[in-house]
Amino acid sequence: MTGMSGSDNRPMTVSEKIFSKASGTPVKAGDFVLANIDLAMTHDITGPLAVEGFYEIMKDEEEKKVWGPSKIVIIFDHQVPADSINAAQNHIMLRKFAKEQGILNYDVYEGVCHQVLPEKGHVRPGDLIVGSDSHTCAYGSLGAFSTGIGSTDMAAVFATGKLWFRVPETFRFEVEGKLPKRVYSKDLILHLIGNVGVEGARYMAAEYAGSTIRSLSIPERMTISNMAIEMGGKAGIIEADEVTEAYLKERIPGYKLDPYWKSDEGARYLDVRHYDVSDLEPQVACPHNVDNVKPVSEVEGTKIDQIFMGSCTNGRFEDIKIMADIMGDEPVAKGVRLLVVPASKTEYMKLLKAGYIEKLINSGAIVEFPCCGPCMGGSFGLLGPGEVGLATSNRNFKGREGSPESFVYLSSPATAGASAITGEITDPRKV
């Protein structure tokens, strides 16, 4: 695929290159293509409907086999361990399907899908990846075009390995400047979402670039790509570089980065915005929309009942370490529940070996095994009517983490750590 140019011999964005590879012909934004899927992911909430749809599609076929067992991954993460009889039945169904089809099934609770797939080496730059979960855009942190689809579309992918797309336009975010002390990638992406709005990048590939983005680690990049959907993005892609290559070499033996998977100089963008984050202060998304973003100074002092530290957005070792280090030896404020849920078993074990799990429990925190849990209001700490939650997750819609009469604020791990010891939303730079 290296060297393919656009359909009019023009420079291409990385998204156009990926769709050109996937469809077998040079394409440009706006084209409709039937694309070959490199990897498909489903989980225990959306998977059962996809399986039912697959069997409906294949009902007249003598052999009811998926198109490529090695290209499908199933992960149990939303309701684990099973928190209802219905969840247990879904798990039984998916275990049976995976065994019957020869599909890799992470059914022993490895963690949240969007953390597990990259850390287990399933994601590569240039891949076209679909998942029946809206935050599948997280894999763009490794230079893949990854996007969420519905369960019925996933059924079609199971059957054919292909899916129709309109090649998206690209919205490029050029970010420059060094992030100030105790300001992190979560603050950056909240700032961008607040700037463009929840529909500002609707059905576009949000492409994050500039010296600030290049300076970020893969965990920090994952946070940014993960939340592209919150500005309406079809994908959130970051150009693969030596940081990406180093991460993948630890997971894929002999991996070598192909420099082709980057946007060409002169590629066409629907919009380009420039940001200097040198003076950015910690950001907080206020109820009940992710684009209702304010500097922490404008919401300081807001009393909170619960803090949820985790999710596929900020549940990695680095995130939880930031929170724990800011808390120091201080206890969780009286009247505040601090829930900590690492994003995967691997991240949990890193925290355990480094002593952070014990430290957090001693501070008064509740540490749960990796799962989606509170993020989707599924289990482990739902908010009651009138309660206020602060979360490092990705959504704060009404009723997202419990009662529709509760209030959810979103912040970075640093802001969560500072707030945990004061009992109110607190600027982490003041602790």
Image (cartoon, rainbow, N blue to C red):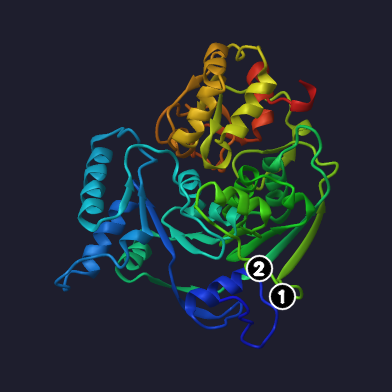
Confirm or deny contact between disc 2 and disc 1 (CB under 8 A).
yes
The quadrant holding residue 303 is top right
117 shown above or below 305: below
* Residue at horizontal 67 percent and vertical 54 percent from the top: 242
Tell me, yes or no, if residue 341 can be seen here.
no
Residue at the outermost bottom position: 8
Residue plotted at (73% across, 51% down): 213
| x and y, in percent, of residue 116 in the image | 46, 44
Q: Is residue 368 left or right of residue 48?
A: right
The amino acid at mark 2 is Thr
Q: Could you say whether the residue bearing mark 2 is in a helix, strand or loop? A: strand
* Residue 333 appearing in the image: yes
**x and y percent of residue 32 in the render?**
51, 80
Left or right: 335, with 425 as reference point:
left
**275 or 215, which lies in front?**
215
Q: Quarter of the image for the C terminus: give it.
A: top right
Circle nearer the N terminus (2, 1): 2
Q: Position of residue 308 (x, y in %)?
A: 54, 29
Which residue is the site of mark 1? 268
- Determine the residue positioned at 85% across, 44% down: 278
